[in-house]
Image (cartoon, helix red, strand yellow):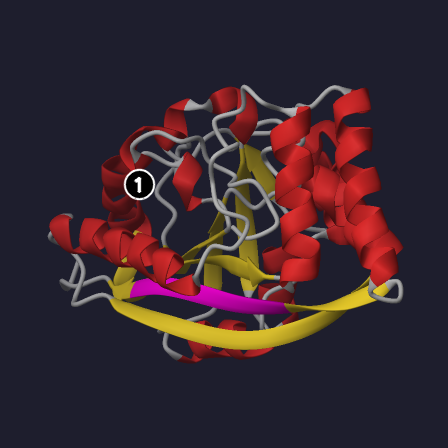
Amino acid sequence: MPILPREQPEQPRAEAHRARGMAESFGVDAQRYDRARPPYPDALVARIVAASPGTDVLDVGCGTGIAARQFRAAGCEVLGVEPDERMAALARTRGLPVEAGTFEAWSPAGRTFDMVVAAQSWHWVDPAAGAAKAADVLRPGGRLAIFGHAYEPPPEVAEPFAAAFRKAVPDSPFKDQPAHRPVELYQAVYAKVGATMREAGRFDVPEQWRFDWERTYTRDQWLDLLPTTGGLTQLAPDRLAGILDAVGRAIDSLGGRFTMHFTTLAATAVRTGTS
């Protein structure tokens, strides 16, 4: 994503779920993650709920429960599945029931749901196995919705970040990604997610939904968020400090704040069949 290293490694997308070290690195500072990560558009949550047959939600890779709390606020009953116990523990302190484990290994124990959602987490799930399991636990007419953010910062912030990242981590698989990644690339990613749903043979024609919005960040708010991203969670403190210093100076040059444009994309489909 622009200004942020991608949260999956530079390898075929079907293999991203094998990178368990990065997948389970976000809990290193679960409190920061929960505090700094942006929520999802209320309009997205409302649309998913309105287009589903009921209010029982399974949140795959729920993390600290950012999306789960939004679905709960919309009147849903939410169960989370999360492989990182540190993230799961924090979600539980917010009153969310969370079961530990990967989605692929998790046992539904006969339970079914009206919605299976994955917020910024599906790339850590085996795509074919995940789509099949989602179909298994969805009630007929239930909805699978996989969604996440594309970040588009002003170039005055994106370029210093990219340069600092290349300098601090010259051997990183993220080093050659452009500072600015057009949303069209993310649309292509979500189109592939939709294709996986279709290939499962148990969903109707997948749709792609798009929500554009903006948020203003102060210097401190943005520097609080950056260490929670996949390419930075495993950095040595001195390397991370160099990146934060460069980005902080760039934001200072803009008056100490900037406006981030977000595009939240969703790939979604309805589970077919009568049983």
Picture residue at 55% right of the left edge, 53% below the top: 2
Image position, residue 183 (x, y; %): 43, 63
Q: Is residue 4 magenta?
A: no
Magenta part of the chain: 261-268
Residue 252 falls in which quadrant of the image?
A: bottom right
Q: Which residue is mark 1?
A: 130
Image position, residue 1 (x, y; %): 51, 50
Q: Left or right? Give the position of 164 relative to 40.
A: right
Q: Residues within 10 Å of mark 1 (few under 14, many from 20)?
A: some
Picture residue at 36% right of the left edge, 56% below the top: 185
Image position, residue 137 (x, y; %): 32, 49
Q: Is residue 63 above or below residue 201?
A: above
Picture residue at 32% right of the left edge, 34% below the top: 126
Picture residue at 43% right of the left edge, 61% below the top: 182
- The chief SS type of the magenta part is strand
Q: Left or right? Give the position of 164 relative to 199.
A: right
Residue 156 falls in which quadrant of the image?
A: bottom right
Return the residue nearer the eye: 143 or 250.
250
Q: Is residue 264 magenta?
A: yes
Which quarter shows the C terminus? bottom left
Residue 216 seen in the figure: yes
At label 1, the amino acid type is: Gly
* Helix, strand or loop status at disc 1: helix
